[in-house]
Image (spheres, rainbow, N blue to C red):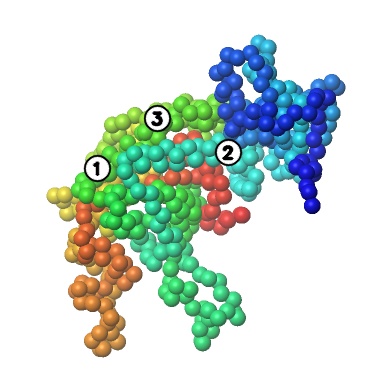
Amino acid sequence: MKTWRGLNHRTLRANVPLRLASTFHKPANIASLLKSSAESTEESSPEIEVNGYVRTIRKQKRIAFAAVGDGSSLQPVQAVLTPEQALSLSTGDSINLRGKWQKCPPGKAQTHELQVTEATRLGYNDATTNPIQKKYQSPEFLRTLPHLRSRLPFNALVLHLRSQVIGSITNFFNKEGFVQTHPPIITSSDCEGAGEVFTVSSNASKDSEQKSDDGEVEHFFRSPKYLTVSSQLHLEALAQSVGNVWTLSPTFRAEKSDTPRHLSEFYMLEGEMTFVDDANQVMDVIENMLSTMARDLQGSHTVQQILQAKSTQTSEEAAEEGAVTAEELSRRWQGMAQSGWPRIQYAQAIETLEEAMKQGTVFQFTPSWGEGLQAEHERFLAEHFGKGQPVFITDYPIEQKPFYMSKTPGGDRTVACFDLLVPDLCELIGGSMREHDLSAIQKVMQERGMLRTLTPEQQAAGESGIPDHKLYEGKHAGTLDWYLDLRRYGSVPHGGFGLGFDRLLCYLAGVGSIRDVVAFPRWYGRCDC
């Protein structure tokens, strides 16, 4: 059966001759239309086609005005319609408009407006029940509507920012010769050793063939597996195959944290570099990557729109937790775009914090060597040393860091690692040199109780199934044995890093909570859709 395009939509035409669709120019989006119009000196009135959503509509006796947006810009297109065209339209409707793009007389807020010749409503919005309203609505309320809140202009800009940051960083890595990879999400081990992992289950029913004779549900993969907490270990394997590698992939932490900086599911940008023997080489790449991205995007339409939104925010928005002004946000971009970020050793950081306390600074947690830096300490250090720029803190005590980090050259108390701190948000990146010597990493694992003793049955039988060359003082590495293989079979000096990508977006968009830069956030007790 033949169906006609637009049969189920209501199309309202002005009294004009029928034109072919090909005669109408269709801009990529409203942002590109407004940008090209602002830069154009032509007096002509081209015929264009625009898709979007009605933000507001004013109906008068002889004319109607609709503000139409599509998520690409804070500024909408002003559409001029006849009363007949506007009769069935309401706020929130999705529409297709065709008409002449005309220059406005001097004195108007906009430079151009669309004189509509044809209006087609594509989707109806029930404005009386729609929970998204034009009035101020708190972030807490909007988080209950993750499927709808991205339609708000600022939230749509954050999605554009995410895409553009990914594009810029991808270009950077391509130019630097890094290989993008896709490591697994289901893993056999906990990279960080913290135990805060999600265990994978098939959720087999009581009648499933996956149940054993005793009624217990058998493991789908024969043994417990987990959602990844980091791709680092797998990236190390891939890096020793193709050289420098990177990934941007989902990561999961079963932390019962209820803070603006933590989620249970988030994205990590991770990189591993081979044939490097100094953590400064890894930090150089990080600094170049982020400063290049900041310079690429600082003057972009999306960033300028975000700054404009901050400069015109309401008193309620300004009072939100973590809210920043346009000036503060601009300072963040400028600081990241500059090079020469400070690099401070942990010991110096502790001395600085202790001296600050002597000078009258009050910390809830007293800083001392060997103790972890608290958020209040990181904020102070970022501002004190960075002065608007990110700052690296290096060479932390061994006890604070995971087993795979190598010692600082010439030292026994610290490891060759770093954290990148940014003003206000604190830690953004963590990285280190990886221990590539087999006996050295086995010794650390033994000291931390990570190696497993052979069972009495295995010892009595005299054959454990584990070759002698994979034992260290009679113990084996269990599910991490494959990781030690990377050291057994031709390892090289290497190092890497992990960047909390959603935290980066929080910082660049001036958003106070990580839950508001992720489209569908998951945190302890919440996974709405």
Mark sitting earlier along the chain (3/2) = 2
Callout 3 crowding tier (Cα within 10 Å): few <14, some 14–19, many ≥20:
some
Mark sitting earlier along the chain (2/1) = 2
Q: Which residue is mark 3?
A: 295
Up-down: is 496 above or below 29? below
The picture places residue 237, in percent across and down from the top left corner, at 31, 59
Outermost residue, left side: 410
Query: Element under label 3?
Result: helix
Q: Which-is-in-front pick, marks 2 and 1? A: 1
Q: Are marks 3 and 2 in contact (CB under 8 Å)?
A: no
| Residue 55 in sight in this render | no
Identify the image quadrant of the C terminus: bottom right
Mark sitting earlier along the chain (3/1) = 1
Pick the front one: 128 or 211? 211
- Cα gap from disc 3 to disc 1, whole angstroms: 21 Å
The picture places residue 430, in percent across and down from the top left corner, at 34, 48
Q: Which residue is mark 1?
A: 281
Quadrant position of residue 20: top right
Outermost residue, top side: 106
